[in-house]
Amino acid sequence: NVSYAVSERPLGTPRHVRIVTIGAGASGINMIRTLREKLSDYEHVVYDKNPSVGGTWYENRYPGCRCDIPAHNYQFSWKKNPAWSTFFAKAEEIERYLCDICRESDLGTSIKTSHVVKSAIWSEEESLWHLKVENTESKELFDDFCHFLLDATGILNKWKWPDIPGLNNFKGDLLHTANWPKDFEYSGKRVAVIGNGSSGVQLVPAIQKDVKELVHFVRSPLWVTPPPQQMLFAMKSESILEDIKMEGDKYTPEQIEKFASDPEYYLKYMKIVEEQINNRFPGTIKDSDIARYTKQALTQYMKATLKGDEKLIKALVPDFAVGCRRLTPAIGYLESLSAENVRVVTDTITEVGEHTIKTSTREEIEIDVLICATGFDVSFCPRFPIIGREGNLQDLWKDALPRAYMSSSVPGFPNYFMFLGPNAPIGHGSVFTITEHVATYIANIILKCQTESILSLAPSTEALDDFYEHINAFMPRTAWASTCRSWFKNGKEDGPVTALHPGSRIHWFHMLEKFRGEDFVYTREKKN
Ligand code: N01
């Protein structure tokens, strides 16, 4: 039925909406700014469960924690920081960067920390989400609502313990890297570290010199790249790179001053760093020349760094495709494994005793501290019930594969958007760049709803199927879909890659720029 009734609101005037974002990490903080730039007549609140902003960078505090994407690419395009002290920024420096942004601009006024969203229920009659929120300081539980619910809770934050019998009987200190106690003292102790993902390989060299003994349990090998500067400098013969002054991976004070005082020069450097990251994508295509070359070069590099130690080489140098597990620069990791106080154990852990770890060779290793660098649950299952038109998203994704249209929305869940949902292009490059593009995509959709009398929209099931037809066709061509255990497959060896998009980031950004209205199902405002 076409209605010719005249709306009281002049065409194009935005309808007032309330927007709630969950999570004040990089995605949530950036969204505040994007909405302020693009929208008018709206309210926006960001709830975060932690007492401070920063998300991942607030939570991860283990020794050696840093980002493995170059600092000058791991920042907002609208808040450049020429003062990063190292090539890969340390966790506390990134946390400070995010806190400073919230304090110095007034973006922080939209954020309520120590607030946990407990449930979200869609009301079809009212076209809005009803929320239950808890203030964890006052313990007050209150109701809120919003027209648009934005999920910026991130991917790698539900840390998981290894499934090892007896773990809870351990009488020494039991720690997880993602939940590191403040000022934990490990010096002079016998320490076991389980896991050699990005967290484990940063932790091991950071604590090795101070502990009495370090027993490192390695279940799968991993590809380690040469020091960052070496990679960057080898790839481009740009004269600007020859000039860059570093001591180890630290930028010298003169270099930082040069970045700060010469914006054109700084921009050029940032572009080279970003280009180097973007250029990595072809290397993830299985059996491509560049993939073969990279595998050969990294094998040589790892063998040389392990100084021909056959036992370590067997344990650590993979045979699977480069990129199948996340590549890591692992600064100082391989070198630290040759130290006298370090022992690499590849035997399976069969049980944890009160003060020991037992292995498949019946050995019992005595330890004081057990550190699990065992990663995260990447099932994408939300932490709280999100009840849309067709039930609870937790139930939908508990048993079935998580699937989201453009990695950001789900059929039956109107006006609900994720920043880094299933199959986002997070396998190569900076999450900051991705989240800025997603924020613009979501803000444009909200603006469309505000100005085109759209009360709600959700992707159609056909559009979701179509999106996954492409993902399923392309994923097998990538290294990510090779056989190796990886969080890209939520810890499985084989099986669908649920965390990554098979295309390049640039491809993804182009897709986000073109909103395909025909892929959505709408409800509209009733005209008088
Ligand atoms: O976790 P992981 P992570 N017995 O899942 C092992 C981001 N991150 O925290 O591979 C023995 O990669 C498991 O072995 P296997 C970054 O994106 C970012 O290290 O399953 N071992 C594996 O070695 C990164 O990729 C930064 O065989 C067991 C390890 O635990 C992502 O987080 C810094 C085991 C888990 O590795 C995840 O990294 C740190 C068992 N029972 C992290 N169970 C930045 O730079 C598990 N393992 C931003």
Image (cartoon, rainbow, N blue to C red):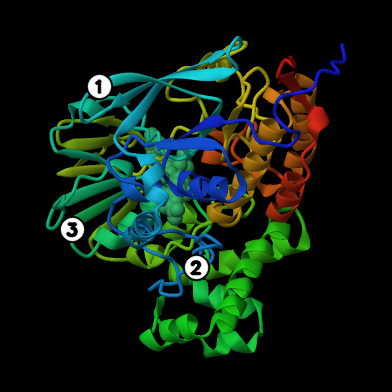
The answer to the question of whether label 1 and label 3 lie on touching residues, with beta carbons closer than 8 A, is no
Position of 432 with respect to 217 (left or right) is right
In this figure, which residue is indicated by the disc labeled 2? 80
Question: Mark 2 packing: few (<14 Cα in 10 Å), some, or many (20+)?
Answer: some
Q: Earlier in the sequence, mark 3 or mark 2?
A: 2
Q: Is residue 150 above or below residue 292?
A: above
Q: Is mark 3 within 8 Å of ligand 1?
A: no
Mark 1 to mark 3: distance in Å?
Answer: 44 Å
| Three-letter amino acid code at the position of disc 3 | Val
Q: Earlier in the sequence, mark 1 or mark 3?
A: 1
Q: Nearer the viewer, residue 118 or 333?
A: 118
Secondary structure beneath disc 1? Answer: loop
In this figure, which residue is indicated by the disc labeled 1? 140
Instruction: Where is residue 176? Give x, y as percent.
Output: 29, 40
Q: Residue at x 25, y 65 (%)?
A: 340
Q: Residue at x 71, y 44 (%)?
A: 502
| Three-letter amino acid code at the position of disc 1 | Glu
Q: Residue at x 42, y 81 (%)?
A: 256
Q: Where does ligand 1 appear, by image quarter?
A: top left
Q: Quadrant of the C terminus?
A: top right
**Residue 153 visible at all:** yes
In this figure, which residue is indicated by the disc labeled 3? 211
Q: Nearer the viewer, residue 359 or 50?
A: 50
Question: Mark 3 packing: few (<14 Cα in 10 Å), some, or many (20+)?
Answer: some
Q: Earlier in the sequence, mark 1 or mark 2?
A: 2
Position of 495 with respect to 361 (left or right) is right
| Three-letter amino acid code at the position of disc 2 | Lys
Secondary structure beneath disc 3? Answer: loop
